């Protein structure tokens, strides 16, 4: 009996210790976020609360498809000296991507190139997890962007979206009917929103530089049943593609599997945006469409790295339209859209999910409602 009592006491002590560690971790994270926002508060110096929420001039008279409205966007920031920079960081033009355009050649990575991709994708996952932890009702897209920027710099990474074809921020924040490429602004996240956070980082490894790209859609607060089903459908669509990745699979065949899952849940697949090869370039061959009957070129081989990122809309309308900022893509009918993205490596026997969650399988995806609930 004394032995049993001793074991029970040890368990209670261990549980108490873990609770204290968790509380300490939360306090440290909250303090870090508070400092990041304080250090970047100059971006909003002199901006009134009215201006933060006012409709930007470029949008006046625009016929919105849904209920979401843009608000004030703070000025673009830079990165510290010594941060690895892609070729577009100053000019906004990815000349190396443009030079490679038109080629269907797909790079087969081995050795250090694979390790470089693993590093970029692991750090990208860390940054996304920081942003997701910060996400809650009341925070703004601008604050999320400042957190992502700081988390990237802290890890010696360049946030890849920054100044890519003049995209003004370090992360894409796409809310509700926004399909992708939402520009973080001063709108506060509301109860019941679904929020996609799309993170890509650029890191140096043994003299070469690599991008790691991923995104997830989160259910914030009390979301309706349709939104929960949509988010799970988007996840299941990516999972269906993941299950097909192995040497010999044709890239064009992923779309049929994705479309089958979407249709079974009364959803549609956006056709205007696709997955892509990734490595030393942000976007390169192959193109990976997510819809059926596409004409993508290429067969998977060990060493290929690419993203799959199906954008899934509620209902049968897959069409998109763009806001006047020339970046924000929204559903044509104003209904909600959700998306998940991983960067994958084709292995000799299947795939490695380079951007998988900490502790999760690197070869199979498993749905977790808790993981996307905020």
Image (tube, rainbow, N blue to C red):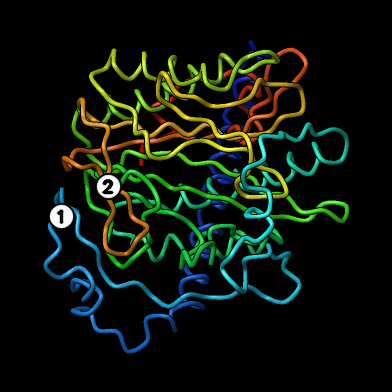
- Counting from the top left corner in percent of width and height, residue 58 is at 23, 72
> Which of the 4 image quarters holds residue 56?
bottom left
The quadrant where residue 118 appears:
top right
The reply, left or right, for residue 78 in relation to residue 218 is right
Measured in 3D between alpha carbons, the distance from the residue under mark 1 to the one under mark 2, in whole angstroms, is: 9 Å
Circles 1, 2 touching at the beta carbon (< 8 Å): yes
Please give left or right for residue 65 compared with residue 209 in the image. left
Look at 18% across and 79% down and name the residue there: 50
66 displayed left or right of 30: left
Tell me the number on the disc at residue 64. 1
Vertical order, 292 against 38 (above or below): above
**Which quadrant holds the C terminus?**
top left
Q: Please tell me in which quadrant of the rendered image residue 90 appears.
A: bottom right
Give the x, y percent position of residue 279.
Answer: 70, 44
Residue found 56% across the figure and 46% down from its top:
20
Residue 127 position in % (x across, y down)? 57, 51
Q: Residue furthest front?
A: 102
- Please tell me which residue lies in front, 24 or 224: 224
User: Helix, strand or loop at disc 2?
Assistant: strand
From the viewer's side, name the closer residue of 258 and 34: 258
Residue drawn at x 79%, y 36% as measured from the top left? 114
Q: Which mark is residue 281?
A: none
Q: Residue furthest top?
A: 1
Residue 330 image label = 2
In the image as oriented, which residue stretches furthest toward the bottom? 46
């Amino acid at each position: 009996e004394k032995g049993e009592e001793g074991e029970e006491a040890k368990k209670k002590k261990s549980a108490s210790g873990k609770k204290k560690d968790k509380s300490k971790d939360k306090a440290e994270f909250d303090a870090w976020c508070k400092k990041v926002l304080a250090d970047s508060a100059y971006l909003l110096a002199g901006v009134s609360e009215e201006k933060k929420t006012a409709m930007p001039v470029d949008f006046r008279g625009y016929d919105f498809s849904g209920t979401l409205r843009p608000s004030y966007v703070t000025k673009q920031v830079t990165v510290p000296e010594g941060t690895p920079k892609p070729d577009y960081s100053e000019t906004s033009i990815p000349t190396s991507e443009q030079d490679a355009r038109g080629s269907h050649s797909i790079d087969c990575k081995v050795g250090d190139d694979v390790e470089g991709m693993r590093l970029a994708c692991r750090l990208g996952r860390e940054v996304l997890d920081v942003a997701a932890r910060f996400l809650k009702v009341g925070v703004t897209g601008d604050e999320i962007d400042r957190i992502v920027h700081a988390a990237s710099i802290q890890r010696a990474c360049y946030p890849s979206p920054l100044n890519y074809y003049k995209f003004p921020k370090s992360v894409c924040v796409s809310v509700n009917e926004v399909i992708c490429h939402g520009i973080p602004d001063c709108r506060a996240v509301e109860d019941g929103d679904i929020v996609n956070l799309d993170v890509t980082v650029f890191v140096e490894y043994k003299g070469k530089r690599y991008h790691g790209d991923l995104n997830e859609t989160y259910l914030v607060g009390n979301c309706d049943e349709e939104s929960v089903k949509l988010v799970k459908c988007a996840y299941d669509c990516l999972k269906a593609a993941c299950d097909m990745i192995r040497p010999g699979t044709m890239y064009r065949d992923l779309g049929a599997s994705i479309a089958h899952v979407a249709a079974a849940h009364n959803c549609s697949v956006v056709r205007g945006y696709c997955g892509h090869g990734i490595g030393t370039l942000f976007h390169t061959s192959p193109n990976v469409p997510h819809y059926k009957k596409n004409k993508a070129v290429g067969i998977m081989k060990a060493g290929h790295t690419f993203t799959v990122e199906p954008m899934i809309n509620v209902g049968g309308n897959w069409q998109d339209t763009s806001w006047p900022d020339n970046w924000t893509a929204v559903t044509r009918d104003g209904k909600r859209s959700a998306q998940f993205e991983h960067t994958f490596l084709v292995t000799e026997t299947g795939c490695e999910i380079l951007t998988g969650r900490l502790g999760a399988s690197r070869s199979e995806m498993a749905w977790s409602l808790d993981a996307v609930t905020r």
